[in-house]
Image (cartoon, helix red, strand yellow):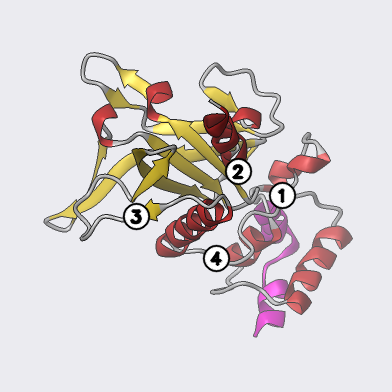
Amino acid sequence: MHKDLVNKKTDIEFSQIVENSSSIFEVAKKIGFSHSPGENSKKKIKDRIKNLGLVLGKMKNTEFSERIEINEHFYNCKDIGNVGVAKFILECVEFGLIVSSPFGDNSPYDFILDLNGELKKIQVKTTSVYDSGVSIFRTVKSYRINKKNISTKYKKSEIDYFYCYSIPLKEGYFIKSDDMIFDKEKETLSECVYIRKESKLNNPNIRESTNLIFSKVIENIFKK
């Protein structure tokens, strides 16, 4: 069946899909795969792209280091969140940090982290979005009321730090809520965080990743 999926589209249809995709996995999903393609299927997709002289749309005019195949399999929302939580706990354990989690699911934060004897409220955010050298994180509270999805901004008093994990880059960033103030009067935080890895985009809202790497931030905290 997968062989048919790879060759089912006409050359024109296949070309349009490739032009509007950022990875082999995205192409596979658009041509009908319901799960991650195997190595054999990925090779067939790549061969067809090569034979038609095509280039993935978002790979044009980018540096090689930005050509990252996003999502090694098709993550659902739960998968994405679980990856970030697991990475945060792993990094804390590696540093010998004490981590606690609140009972129940009504807390605005995910964890309490002991940093040099001070207890800090931590919220984990994870993204699979990496576009033009920038990782994009949605930093809002999401929940359902009467079968409707609701999103609200965090207040500064609710969170001390965000741990933001990028699945494509396999990097975790640690951002202080003081650096994310959006509305000073209401003391609400920004709805999105943009972190630049190697992007050439010139935007004051995009943060440099270098000084936000979790390990570097933790090391600096313990130096004080």
Q: Mark 4 and mark 3: span between their CA atoms?
A: 30 Å
| Magenta-drawn stretch contains 48 | no
Label 3 CA crowd tier, 10 Å (few <14, some 14–19, many 20+): some
The amino acid marked with disc number 2 is: Tyr
At x 70%, y 45%, the residue is 57
Q: CA distance from mark 1 to mark 4?
A: 15 Å
Work out whether mark 1 precedes mark 3 in sequence or the reverse, and give the earlier one.
1
Q: Earlier in the sequence, mark 2 or mark 3?
A: 3
Q: CA distance from mark 1 to mark 3?
A: 34 Å
Q: Does label 4 or label 2 sit earlier along the sequence?
A: 4
Query: Relative to 58, does residue 92 appear above or below in the rendering?
Result: below
> In the orientation shown, which residue stands out farthest toward the front?
117
Which residue type does callout 1 highlight? Ile
The quadrant of the image that shows the N terminus is bottom right
Of the two numbered discs 1 and 3 in the rendering, the one whose residue sits closer to the viewer? 3
* Left or right of 202 in this view: 117: left
Query: Seen in the image, is 143 located left or right of residue 63?
Result: left
State the SS at label 2.
Answer: strand
> Which element is circle 3 on?
strand
Label 1, secondary structure: give it. loop
Give the labeled residue for mark 2: 130
User: Mark 3 highlights which residue?
Assistant: 100
Question: Which SS class for mark 4?
Answer: loop
Q: Assess whether mark 2 and mark 1 are in contact (beta carbons under 8 angstroms).
A: yes
Residue with the mark numbered 4: 74
Residue at left offset 16%, top offset 58%: 147
Residue 56 at x, y = what percent? 74, 49
Classified by dominant secondary structure, the portion drawn in magenta counts as: helix
Q: Residue 68 bears which disc, if any?
A: 1
